[in-house]
Image: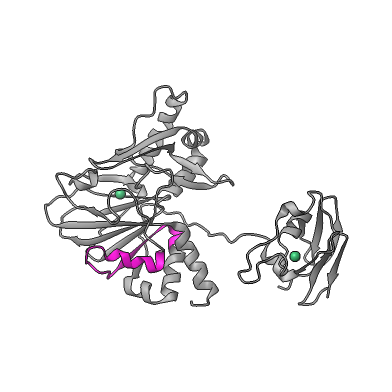
């Protein structure tokens, strides 16, 4: 549908535009001046902004506003500022600046199975890559199949997922049964759903769990939609949800060589109050200090969350074979595995990436029309 502006009204610090469908948009004068796209306000070579907001008065208002070519495809708002500067906004550009793109998250439970994608296709085909990333952004999880089984071959994923996010311990983390291992994953015990490196204030938020070989009985993989559970918890027990957002919890992972420790609430919200991050790692959680005034309420809430995370109905279970890579959105999806029942060889490697890089790779693919 072609949108045009039927009228503009000037107010003290803003003007209101009424669109042809009756919708109204408030345009603050400072916003209009700040986003001017002219060659004086931009670095021509890079299109980056060159204009600095301090260089105009805080109570800036236009000298004159007009609608050029009204109703046509070239329609634009033209603004003359008191210092003689001229700003020109094509209507189509203003429409594009109304909202930010959003992703519709799809929540899931234990009946879900992550979508599977061919590893070579993911690397070779832009449209296959875009398809995987779209699914990953929606559900927070997918599985690559027919991947190489050579150690450290997950380095190749960097072409699509961005550079590896290095953490303490190894750049690419080895998970196999090791009597000297520093982590529960190095034992044959079941590993309950958790996310990794809750002991960082910014844990890595994409995790590739790359199975190189799996000749072991048991050791099935499980994933849990942490955001799905938290959404339900927020509806069922808003007070419990709230206390999980507020009480700082220490997490720690350590070996002889390394120490990684940070104190943060289990649930973090963004500035819109939407879920940003879940930190859930029973093995690495440390004692919340007894001086915490909300300790009793926190424990009631943590108990409820622990019950929901460990409910088999929330856990999607499947087996990763050699050459399978499980991709998890680390701030949303918890991963774990069942106990190993035999001593068969099993070698998993973890590599971490950043969600921003994955998301923007999709933008790049779309912008370049490569899909
Ligand atoms: Fe883990
Ligand atoms: Zn300008």
Residue 271, image x, y percentages:
58, 45
Identify whether 168 is placed above or below 123: above
* Residue, far left: 343
* Residue, far right: 63
Residue 258, image x, y percentages:
28, 42
Identify whether 262 is placed above or below 3: above
Residue 152 highlighted magenta (yes or no) = yes
The residue at the point 14 percent across, 57 percent down is 345
Residue 107, image x, y percentages:
45, 54
Specify start and end residues of the magenta stretch as a single range: 136-161
Comparing 20 with 119, the one in front is: 119
The residue at the point 49 percent across, 39 percent down is 236
Comparing 230 with 60, the one in front is: 60
Locate residue 269 relative to residue 173 in the image: left or right: right
Which image quadrant: the N terminus?
A: bottom right
Residue 134, image x, y percentages:
46, 65
């Amino acid at each position: 549908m072609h949108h045009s502006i039927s009228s503009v009204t000037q107010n003290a610090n803003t003007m209101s535009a009424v669109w042809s469908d009756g919708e109204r948009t408030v345009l603050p004068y400072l916003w209009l001046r700040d986003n001017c796209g002219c060659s004086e306000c931009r670095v021509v070579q890079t299109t980056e902004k060159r204009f600095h907001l301090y260089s105009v008065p805080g109570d800036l208002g236009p000298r004159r506003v007009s609608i050029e070519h009204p109703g046509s495809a070239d329609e634009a708002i033209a603004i003359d500022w008191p210092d003689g500067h001229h700003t020109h906004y094509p209507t189509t550009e203003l429409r594009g600046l109304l909202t930010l793109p959003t992703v519709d998250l799809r929540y899931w439970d234990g009946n879900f199975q992550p979508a599977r994608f061919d590893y070579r296709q993911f690397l070779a085909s832009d449209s296959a890559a875009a398809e995987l990333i779209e699914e990953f952004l929606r559900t927070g999880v997918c599985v690559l199949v027919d991947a190489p089984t050579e150690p450290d071959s997950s380095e190749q994923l960097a072409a699509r997922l961005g550079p590896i996010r290095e953490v303490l311990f190894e750049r690419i983390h080895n998970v196999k049964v090791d009597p000297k291992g520093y982590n529960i994953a190095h034992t044959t015990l079941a590993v309950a759903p958790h996310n990794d490196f809750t002991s960082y204030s910014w844990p890595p938020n994409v995790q590739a769990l790359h199975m190189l070989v799996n000749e072991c009985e048991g050791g099935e993989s499980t994933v849990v939609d942490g955001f799905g559970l938290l959404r339900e918890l927020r509806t069922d027990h808003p007070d419990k949800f709230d206390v999980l957002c507020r009480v700082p919890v220490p997490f720690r992972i350590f070996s002889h060589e390394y120490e990684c420790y940070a104190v943060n609430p289990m649930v973090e919200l963004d500035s819109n109050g939407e879920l940003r991050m879940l930190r859930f790692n029973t093995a690495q959680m440390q004692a919340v200090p007894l001086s915490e005034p909300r300790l009793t309420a926190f424990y009631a809430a943590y108990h409820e969350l622990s019950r929901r995370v460990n409910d088999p109905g929330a856990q999607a279970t499947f087996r990763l074979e050699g050459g399978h890579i499980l991709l998890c959105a680390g701030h949303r999806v918890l991963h774990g595995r069942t106990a190993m029942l035999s001593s068969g060889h099993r070698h998993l490697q973890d590599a971490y990436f950043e969600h921003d890089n994955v998301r923007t790779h999709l933008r790049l693919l779309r912008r370049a029309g490569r899909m």
